[in-house]
Amino acid sequence: MMHWGWGWIMLFVWVTASPSQAVAEAPGAGWQPDALLSRLMLRTLVQAPDGLLWVGTDDGVYRYDGTRLVPLNALRRQGPALPAVACDHLLPLATGGLWLGTEAGLYLLGADGRLRRRPLPNPQGTSRAVESLTLAPDGRRVWVGQRGGGLQAYSLDGRLLGLPLRTAGVYDVRAAPDGTLWANDPTAGLQHLAATGRVLGTWPTTGHYGRLVLDPTGRAWVLTAGGAYRPAPAGQWQAAAPWEPAARYPPEARVDLSAGPGGLGLLSRGQLRQLGWTAGSAPRPRVLFTLLLPPWPTAAWSGRLRHDQGGHWWLFDSGTRTCWRREAVPAFVRALPGPDGQPYSVRATVRLPNGRLLVSTYETGLLTQAADSPLAPLRHWAAATLPTGNVPTLMGVVPAAVGPRGDWLAAGVSPLLRFNPRTGALREVPLADVGQGTPNGLCLARDPATGRVWAGSRSGLHFYDSTRQVFQPYRLPQAGPASKPAAPLAGRIVEDIWPDGRGHLWLATPEGVERLTLATGVRQDFGPLAAPPRRAPLDGARCLYHGPDGRLWVGTRTHGLLVIEPDGRARSVLTLGQGLPDASIASVLPGPGGHLWLGTYQGLVRYQPATGQLSVFTTAQGLASNECNARAAYVDPLDGHSLLIGGVAGLHRIYPGQMPGPRSRASRLLLTGWQALSADAATSRVRYRLPADGPPPLALAPDAPLIDLHLALTNDSDPGRARYAYRVRGWLADRWLGLGTTPLLRLQGLPPGRYTVEIRAETSQGVPAANQLRLPLTVTAPWWSRPLTWVLAGLAAVAAVYQWQRRRLRQMQRDNALRGQLAADLHDEVGALLTRVTMQAELLHELEQGPPARLAALVADSRAAASTVRDIIWSVDTQADTLTALVDRIRDHLDTTSRATGRLLHLDEAALPPVLDRPLPPTMRQQVYLIFKEAVTNALKYARPDQPIQVVLRCASPLLELTVTSAGEAPAAGRAGQGLRNMSQRAARLGATLATGPVPGGWQVRLRVPG
């Protein structure tokens, strides 16, 4: 755009706005690759007001929530499909709409999902490609630039406003607060235009590359790789802010520019400059800090930079499938480069007496760093070698002199050592009373109360004997002049030691934690096998920190962080479900503000015990690797506030005071889609949410037993580590249930009812989202298990029983009426006839006008017929269905039979109830009466004439019992046998029990009828 000479270079030196504040960092530090976006050939990236990202690619447009990519055509609900063409420009609106500038034309996606094609500024142009989309400062108009010339203003709903402005090029357009436009083109130069299209100024170009930006006052600037320039009168350029020597970055070097919440980002190959504006009425750009870029995968470079409102930069190349993300803040995590830039695995760190930093590593040996260069690369310390010439690895160092030479004690991978911090000389310290081999030293600790140094190893607990200059195994205190006391911890693995200065040693072992009282040798264990309240999952304890408040913090291999309270209670504090990225804690380090810094295998965690808030830092914040080494954490005593955290890829210096404050845009929790899973594929499709949508109608039913809710947390620096939780009001006592880092909630198995599902989230840094989701949910049961179904079924059953009873009652009434009619007819007709016959037979017998024998037989038969008819009438009479009628009928029969035969028949009624109104079914009273008559008849035939016949009737609800007893022989075969069979058949019809047989002195018939 401008042709520079040496005069311009000298002018750079003169008018420097602010020196570049680049910091030493590894290339690509803090840049996090995005796996999903790296699959696409990106052209542009913007953030909508709801916090979701829209990306334009070579083959269309996608919505991105940090974990899922959704094509625009899957979100579209009306209108034509978007063609699979490149989209270079996207403009989201506060109303929820989205403008799309593609190579095939201009489109507008409404908040309701309707996609419309809009006319171009110059429909007859040689190209349909859109080159720029710009929102006017008043937010009421959109300026659209078309390739080949032409600018047009549109209303927010897509209507053309005014006439198009003809320009030579529209590569880069900015709308100023005063309503004017600035249009920049690499070949046509810079133009300043009025809203009517009148040219207010022109600044030609000679092909040099630059990007257009407006300062807070609305003045135009062009930023290049070498510096910032402002258009001056008469088509001239004025250099204002050189930030690099022009020889390093020639003016034609390609750059990209993006304006974010933290200021401007100027991208050039190799680095990103974070720019800000100076204060005052004439602001100028200045460099705030510099971020080095990741290594580029190709020789050709077409880098592009975009920002989001959460304070993150997005970096991609329109010619390759790569995309990175990082926070737009100075790095507060600084990875210290190793010798020759190679990675190194840190074991222990300590400050030497001369102020140099000493770092012990695996395989690389001992490294040092000058005291006045806290970010300088580490160098080898060649003098620090073992007498054997091997490179030492120190597991722990006690920076306190133990002899006149000023030696320190150190624990090595194999031996325990004396270490001279001035010369680097190392000597092995003998270990007394050790059998075969030398144990591996794991840790060292100095008791502040006694000055004694304790060592933990794979063979137990030892202490340094300064008199003999050896390490002795710990033994129980001598109780008397007896034999050598026992070594209770011999053979145990002691991973960490913490003297509390009060006569106790806290020991971390694979079995748990032990508190050793040195004066008595008493050990108190804490772990899964200990008695309450000391029982806790402390097995696999590996690192300890005893705080000034008396609490002991314990990092374990598989159970996260636990604490032992001063009163001896042990409990879990942090686990995977509570936000830890990994259950194995390698180190616990106190930091400023009461925080605890936890090194894990999946990142560095900052935990605040007072509030429970935790933040997770990973390679996204500058760590060389997410894996931290065991106990490789150190508070640098040189400044007292920076932390040194060692990992498998190097040492990191952490500046807690430089951590960024609250974001300008808080994270929001969104429901991006939902899916009701059922057998119907059309019903089971994902229903994506749009800005204009209301709460979704969530319903669990027999045909849709599962619902998946797709969640997203916006403006998080590491969305894959965001944490989610939910609860269902009215279920499980409204308890919150953790989802971990899974942005998917599956609802199933709830009992029928109406609920409210509440969902909350927090970022990877432990900051709660600014909102919670509250969604109504209706759960309907299968039709056969719904309460209404049961009510209707019950009503139907009651109705059926009622109808059955009603029909039965009607049938009984009809039967009773028929029986009554039959009884009346028999009584009135047949009974009267037989009565007349009997009377005539008796009259003839009295007159003796016929043969006496035949007249006697006629009288007997007529009487028998009349009695039979009376029995039949009684059996069908509805008025006789009571116990009273049965007893009366039995009495009448016994009286009649006794008069006719002259025999003594006795009825015992002592066992009958006082009131005989108990109803009896017709069949029961008929059959009982007939059995009674048959039994009495048989008794009269076979009993001795001079002996009475005893009839006993008992009624004890619900049992009816009849007994007929006579004195005499058993009934003979023949007709009597037929009578017994008849009685048995009648008893079977009643379901009764009939017993017939001899008794002492006679014969008995016994009938037992259940009620």
Image: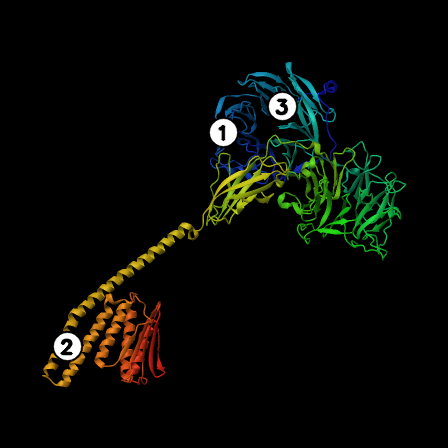
Residue assigned mark 1? 118
Q: Secondary structure at mark 1?
A: strand
Q: Secondary structure at mark 2?
A: helix
Image quarter in which the N terminus is found: top right
| Eye-nearest disc, 2 or 3 | 2
Instruction: Work out how far the residue at label 3 is from the one at label 1, CA to CA, in angstroms.
Output: 28 Å
Image quarter in which the C terminus is found: bottom left
Residue assigned mark 2? 838
Q: Residues within 10 Å of mark 3 (few under 14, many from 20)?
A: many
Q: Are marks 2 and 3 in contact (CB under 8 Å)?
A: no
As drawn, the label of residue 941 is none
Residue 79 coordinates in the image, percent (x, y): 47, 35
Q: Earlier in the sequence, mark 2 or mark 3?
A: 3
| Eye-nearest disc, 1 or 2 | 2
Residue 766 coordinates in the image, percent (x, y): 63, 38
| Eye-nearest disc, 3 or 1 | 3
Residue assigned mark 3? 213
Q: Earlier in the sequence, mark 3 or mark 1?
A: 1
Q: At label 3, which amino acid type do we have? A: Val
Image height of 630 relative to 306, above or below: below
Q: At label 2, which amino acid type do we have? A: Thr
Image height of 701 relative to 623, above or below: below
Q: Earlier in the sequence, mark 1 or mark 2?
A: 1
From the viewer's perspective, tell me whether residue 802 is left or right of residue 467: left
In the foreground, 440 or 879: 879
* Residue 67 visible within the image: yes
Q: At label 1, which amino acid type do we have? A: Arg
Q: Are marks 3 and 1 in contact (CB under 8 Å)?
A: no
From the viewer's perspective, tell me whether residue 898 is left or right of residue 984: left
In the foreground, 938 or 552: 938
Q: Secondary structure at mark 3?
A: strand
Residue 400 coordinates in the image, percent (x, y): 84, 40
